[in-house]
């Protein structure tokens, strides 16, 4: 790999300086009271390397316009382009720093910078990641998929994604995170920055399917300009501790920005999702919809916020979080929040935690369905409201099967 240009090295140095100057996270901060920073190696020692364990699953390029793979934070399989229109770029972000400097330089770190510990840590230490560029008016018919896996060889792994969709562009990107069950702890830090210009249509899907002993902190920020459609879909199924932070920055009139999430926690898994829509332009729409199922002794946390500062009249924004608790001992916390500083808006929020209704189970059992199958059907039905927003049929079926496996386990 070619050495990074001077401007990129300077940015990393500034991030490292900011990281050293930032105060220590104690876990007493309001935003960190549910997930201790030490659980994600934001503070404290970095986990040691362990015996490598390879993931027996292999990605497939079928039905993809391009694929790229990363292992332990390094490029392992360069981008393979199968059906990319002219002008579309899919590459390792580290290579793009030099080869596509004009497209990268002004955008990288502009949505997720160095002003807090997680952002500065990632900016200072990432080495590889996904870069996608779609020119004006171009539609990429098939999804672009990046796979990131870890083996335990490194105790801490960093990755970064940058997506740029010009005016009228249309693209779907899948960031897939996975591993086998590991023998030692690995902490993963990822950042995703998405830029959608006027009239663009961008869907970004994160599939978090780690094995045991993986802890993952990820930040996703998307900028939606005038008349854009931007969807962030996050599916959280694997990992010991996972904290996901999607933020939709609504910066254009007529924008449609949606953050959609689905999670299923079991065993002693701990998942936290902190989801924000910030409206900075009038007459725009957003929808935060997250649904989750929890069983065994798992714990999930949802914090959602609709932010409408002065200057965004006509905002139409919704926020919903619903949780289905499958047994005693499982726990879900939901904290929907509003910050409204503009008149003439329509904003709503809702959060709910409930158990599987015994009457629903009885109804299905009375018609010959076993109790386990009844629970599976109820959970699948509960999740379909989010799955129906996933545009790719094959991915929707894959996620539905994964949820069914967790219900049965």
Image: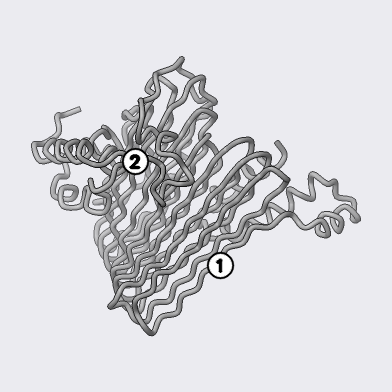
Question: Which residue matches tag 2?
Answer: 25
The furthest residue to the top: 51
Above or below for 48 versus 201: above
Give how far across and how far down residue 331 sits, in percent.
63, 47
Q: Are marks 2 and 1 in contact (CB under 8 Å)?
A: no
Q: Quadrant of the N terminus?
A: top left
Above or below for 186 versus 226: above
Q: Nearer the viewer, residue 132 or 214?
A: 214
Residue 350 has which mark? Answer: 1
Q: Nearer the viewer, residue 274 or 394?
A: 274
**Circle 2: element type:** loop
Give how far across and how far down residue 133 sits, in percent.
26, 51
Q: Nearer the viewer, residue 272 or 90?
A: 272
Q: Nearer the viewer, residue 368 or 28?
A: 28
**Circle 1: element type:** strand
Residue drawn at x 32%, y 42% is 118
Q: Nearer the viewer, mark 2 or mark 1?
A: 2
Using the numbered discs, state the Cα–Cα distance from disc 2 to disc 1 in whole angstroms.
Answer: 30 Å
Q: Quadrant of residue 385?
A: bottom right
Give how far across and how far down residue 371 sits, in percent.
83, 46
Q: Quadrant of residue 169?
A: bottom left
Residue drawn at x 51%, y 28% is 213
**Residue 67 shown left or right of residue 99 in the figure:** right
Above or below for 180 versus 111: above
């Amino acid at each position: 790999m070619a050495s990074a240009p001077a401007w990129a090295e300077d940015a990393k140095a500034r991030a490292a300086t900011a990281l050293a100057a930032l105060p220590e996270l104690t876990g007493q901060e309001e935003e960190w009271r549910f997930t201790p920073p030490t659980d994600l190696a934001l503070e404290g020692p970095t986990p040691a390397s362990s015996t490598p364990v390879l993931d027996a699953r292999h990605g497939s390029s079928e039905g993809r316009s391009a694929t790229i793979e990363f292992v332990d934070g390094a490029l392992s399989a360069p981008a393979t382009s199968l059906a990319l229109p002219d002008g579309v770029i899919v590459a390792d972000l580290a290579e793009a720093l030099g080869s596509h400097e004009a497209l990268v330089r002004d955008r990288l770190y502009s949505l997720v910078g160095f002003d807090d510990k997680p952002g500065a840590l990632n900016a200072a230490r990432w080495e590889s990641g996904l870069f996608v560029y779609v020119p004006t008016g171009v539609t990429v018919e098939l999804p672009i998929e990046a796979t990131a896996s870890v083996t335990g060889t490194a105790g801490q792994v960093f990755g970064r994604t940058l997506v740029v969709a010009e005016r009228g562009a249309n693209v779907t990107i899948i960031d897939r995170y996975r591993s086998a069950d590991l023998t030692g702890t690995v902490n993963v830090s990822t950042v995703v920055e998405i830029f959608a210009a006027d009239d663009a249509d961008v869907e970004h899907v994160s599939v978090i399917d780690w094995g045991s002993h993986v802890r993952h902190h990820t930040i996703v920020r998307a900028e939606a300009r005038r008349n854009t459609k931007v969807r962030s879909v996050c599916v959280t199924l694997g990992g010991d501790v996972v904290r996901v932070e999607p933020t939709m920055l609504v910066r254009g009139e007529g924008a449609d920005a949606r953050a959609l999430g689905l999670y299923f926690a079991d065993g002693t898994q701990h998942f936290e999702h902190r989801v924000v829509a910030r409206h900075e332009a009038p007459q725009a729409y957003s929808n935060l919809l997250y649904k989750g199922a929890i069983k065994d002794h798992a714990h999930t946390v949802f914090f959602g916020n609709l932010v409408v500062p002065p200057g965004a009249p006509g905002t139409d924004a919704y926020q919903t979080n619903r949780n289905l608790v499958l047994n005693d001992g499982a726990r879900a916390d939901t904290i929907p929040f509003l910050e409204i500083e503009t008149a003439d808006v329509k904003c709503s929020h809702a959060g709910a935690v409930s158990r599987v209704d015994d009457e629903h189970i009885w109804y299905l059992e009375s018609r010959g369905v076993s109790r386990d199958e009844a629970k599976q059907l109820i959970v699948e039905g509960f999740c379909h409201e989010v799955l129906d927003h996933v545009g790719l049929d094959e991915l929707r079926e894959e996620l539905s099967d994964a949820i069914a496996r967790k219900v049965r386990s």
